[in-house]
Amino acid sequence: MKYLKIIFLLICVSGFAQTKVGTIDVDFVLSKMPELTGVQKQVEDYGNGLEADLKKKMDAYQAEIERYKQDEGGLTINQRKVRQDSIIAMENDITKFQQNGNQLIVIKREEYMQPLYNKVGAALEKIAQAEGYTQVLLRNSDVVYIDNRFDLTIAVLRELGIEVKEGE
C-alpha cells in the first residue's frame, strides 16, 4: 500500500511538471480588431446621448431659476419654498447625473466590448488546446520575464484572420 502511494505521488508530480505556460497581450489583439472602431463609435454615441440629456436638464434648471426670479415678488412664502425645493431637487439630480455619467459610459463600453472579448477568448482557447498550453497569462507589467516563443498574441490574431505587419 505504501508503495502504491509513492507511485501515485510520483505520477502526480510528473503530471504537474508537464505544464506549458503562454502569454497574450489582449489589448494589442483588441486594437487590431476591425470591430473595435464600431464599438468606439457606439460608446461615443452613447456618451453624446448622455451629454444631450445633461444639457436638457441644465436648460430646464436654468429656465426654472429664471421663472423663479421673475415670479418671486408675487409668490407667497409657501410657494417660494416649493419652488426653491424644486430647484434644489433639480440641482441634486444634475449632480447625481454627472457623477453617474462616467460610470454609465464604462458599463456600456464593457457591454459593447464583451462580444470582442468572447471572440478573442474562443480563439485563444482553440490555440491553447491545439498547442497543449495549460495556462495562459495576460502580458502586462506584472509579468517579470516573458520568452516570446510562448506568446500567443500573434497566433490569436491569425486565428481571428487579422494580419499583422512585421515589427508590430
Image (cartoon, rainbow, N blue to C red):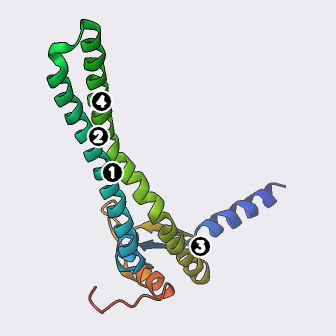
Sequence-first disc among 4 and 1: 1
Residue type, mark 1 in image? Leu
Quarter of the image for residue 113 reads bottom left
- Is 161 left, or right, of 45 in this rendering? right
Above or below, 55 relative to 23 = above
For label 3, the SS is loop
Q: Disc 4 or disc 3, which is closer to the eye?
A: 4
- Is 125 left, or right, of 161 in this rendering? right
Residue 165's tag is none
Residue matched to label 4: 90
Q: Residue furthest right?
A: 1
Mark 4 surroundings: few (<14), some (14-19) or many (≥20) residues within 10 A: some
Q: Residue at 59% x, 73% y: name it.
A: 18
Quarter of the image for residue 99 reads top left
Residue type, mark 2 in image? Lys
Residue type, mark 3 in image? Gln
Residue matched to label 2: 57
Whether label 4 touches label 1, CB < 8 Å: no
Q: Residue 51 placed where, x, y %?
A: 28, 51
Residue type, mark 4 in image? Met
Sequence-first disc among 1 and 3: 3
For label 4, the SS is helix
| Cα distance between the residues tagged 4 and 3 | 63 Å
Q: Residue at 40% x, 69% y: name it.
A: 39
Q: Residue 131 placed where, x, y %?
A: 57, 83
Q: Disc 2 or disc 1, which is closer to the eye?
A: 2
Quarter of the image for residue 72 reads top left
Residue 33 or 60: which is nearer the viewer? Answer: 60
Residue matched to label 3: 18
